[in-house]
Image (cartoon, helix red, strand yellow):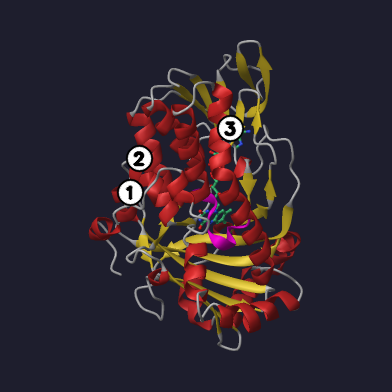
């Protein structure tokens, strides 16, 4: 199908990628976004081989890799100094794959600039509050009381709290405080590792290298601290010093890094939700990315899933003779991978974020040893890389050329 008039609601990762792919296929695309100036919210994230495969198709992989940090290992210790997480991309086949730690602004900027260069119309300051299907199309309704023209298709990529998706349940008790800080000039930190420290599953601290942000030459990191949503106020009242004390008790080597946090406003609390829409298609409406399936970022897949969804939609429409068939094809080709990762994330999240002692014991005494023997390392690598369940083949995607991409990396490995 070509020449559809498509509204993409949400100018996030899924929205920008979908807009670009659909525009390149010859559809008329209009992007709608609530902010007056579209911007990414949050700190760093991990791009997996799955997400990079889509970015490569968009011609953006080199730029994104040049601004990110090559992550070869996810490494976590408990308070006894035992290694309870050690996932290595070297265990994946083919060899040479890596994860990419990147600041959201770099990923967003690459996608956004491509959208602007393509001349895709962007309606900012448009807070979507609902939609309605009419005889000749679906309209978006905005907070100001206006409506969009009727579009052949509305793509809901409004994220975890989408106003177009039917349910808003599934908020998890735990979220995390996040911030971006300069990478320390010295210290025991490895620029190729996402590192974490755990006290059972009650406390978790992490550092993700995020490379150099677009337009900057300075190496940065994302620092995160697991926190219950109902503990945020207490943490703020307890003050920064108390929080730093708790953090350093778990990970004393971070003293120099924490000195750079002088105001609680530097820390942003992100809450997570775990939910999957059973029917992500309505008449002339499809829900993708977090609007279809959201989860805690424990396995670091949400943005990658969003990119795969966008690719699936473009491919589904390209090969279909009518709209309904195209939307069904897009969802059916993604459904099993989404279901697998939603189940896996739901299973693994409590092992890292829970008040109970039992999940951390299972993690430390069962899963950590299992991940080191037999097929364990490879299974763990595939899971972390987003490749479990073989999502790329059925989307007609290939892994990007990692050897060539490695040459564009600005940051030492
Ligand atoms: C702390 C944290 C860490 C994460 N780490 C990772 C990671 O390492 N790897 C990974 O792959 N994923 C990670 N994720 C998940 C990832 O960020 C999401 O899965 C991804 O951003 C989803 O993309 P999306 O386009 O569906 O939604 P979003 O990126 O949330 O985009 C939604 C867009 O819609 C706009 N919008 C929302 N509501 C409205 C409205 N009513 N009207 C108009 N516009 C609206 C928003 O402003 C935004 O531009 C993390 C998430 C969090 C919170």
Label 1 CA crowd tier, 10 Å (few <14, some 14–19, many 20+): many
As drawn, the label of residue 172 is none
For this view, does 330 lie left or right of residue 408?
right
Q: Which quadrant: the C terminus?
A: bottom left
Residue 183 position in % (x across, y down): 39, 68
For this view, does 29 lie left or right of residue 95?
right
In percent of the image, x 39 and y 43: which residue is there?
A: 109
- The part of the chain drawn in magenta is 295-303
Q: Which quadrant: the N terminus?
A: top left
The residues tagged by marks 3 and 1 sit, at their Cα atoms, a distance apart of 28 Å
In percent of the image, x 32 and y 65: which residue is there?
A: 96
Label 3 CA crowd tier, 10 Å (few <14, some 14–19, many 20+): some
Mark 1 = which residue? 61
Question: Is tag 3's residue or tag 1's residue first in the polypeptide sequence?
Answer: 1
In percent of the image, x 30 and y 58: which residue is there?
A: 402
Contact between labelled residues 2 and 1, with CB atoms less than 8 Å apart:
yes
Under circle 1, the secondary element is helix
Mark 2 = which residue? 58
Q: Nearer the viewer, residue 183 or 88?
A: 88
The residues tagged by marks 1 and 2 sit, at their Cα atoms, a distance apart of 8 Å
Label 2 CA crowd tier, 10 Å (few <14, some 14–19, many 20+): some
- Magenta-span inclusion, residue 301: yes
In percent of the image, x 51 and y 69: which residue is there?
A: 379
Mark 3 = which residue? 328
Residue 249 position in % (x across, y down): 60, 82
């Amino acid at each position: 199908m070509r020449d559809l008039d498509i509204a993409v609601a949400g100018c996030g990762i899924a929205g920008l990628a979908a807009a670009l792919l659909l525009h390149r296929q010859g559809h008329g695309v209009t992007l709608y976004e609530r902010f007056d100036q579209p911007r990414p919210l949050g700190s760093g994230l991990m791009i997996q081989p799955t997400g990079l495969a889509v970015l490569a198709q968009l011609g953006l992989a080199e730029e994104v890799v040049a601004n990110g940090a090559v992550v070869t290992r996810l490494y976590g210790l408990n308070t006894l100094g035992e290694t309870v997480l050690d996932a290595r991309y070297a265990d994946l086949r083919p060899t040479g794959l890596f994860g990419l730690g990147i600041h959201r602004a770099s990923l967003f900027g690459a996608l956004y600039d491509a959208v602007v260069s393509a001349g895709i119309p962007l309606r900012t300051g448009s807070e979507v509050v609902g939609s309605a299907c009419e005889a000749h199309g679906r309209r978006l309704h905005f907070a100001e009381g206006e409506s969009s023209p009727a579009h052949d298709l509305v793509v809901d990529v409004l994220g975890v709290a989408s106003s177009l998706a039917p349910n808003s349940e599934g908020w998890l008790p735990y979220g995390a405080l996040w911030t971006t800080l300069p990478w320390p000039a010295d210290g025991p930190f490895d620029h190729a590792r996402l590192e974490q420290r755990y006290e059972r599953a009650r406390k978790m601290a992490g550092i993700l290298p995020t490379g150099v942000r677009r337009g900057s030459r300075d190496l940065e990191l994302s620092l995160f601290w697991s926190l219950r949503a109902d503990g945020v106020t207490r943490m703020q009242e307890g003050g920064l010093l108390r929080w730093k004390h708790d953090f350093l008790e778990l990970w004393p080597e971070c003293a120099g890094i924490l000195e750079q946090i002088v105001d609680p406003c530097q820390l942003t609390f992100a809450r997570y939700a775990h939910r999957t829409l059973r029917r992500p298609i309505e008449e002339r409406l499809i829900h993708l990315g977090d609007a279809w399936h959201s989860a805690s970022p424990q396995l670091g897949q949400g943005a990658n899933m969003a990119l795969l969804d966008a690719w699936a939609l473009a491919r589904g429409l390209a090969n279909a003779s009518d709209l309904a068939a195209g939307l069904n094809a897009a969802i059916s080709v993604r459904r099993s991978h989404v279901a697998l990762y939603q189940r896996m994330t739901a299973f693994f999240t409590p092992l890292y974020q829970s008040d109970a002692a039992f999940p951390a014991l299972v993690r430390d005494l069962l899963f950590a040893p299992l991940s080191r023997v037999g097929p364990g390392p490879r299974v763990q690598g595939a899971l972390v890389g987003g490749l479990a369940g073989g999502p790329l083949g059925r989307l007609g995607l290939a892994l990007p050329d990692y050897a060539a991409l490695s040459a564009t990396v600005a940051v030492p490995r």
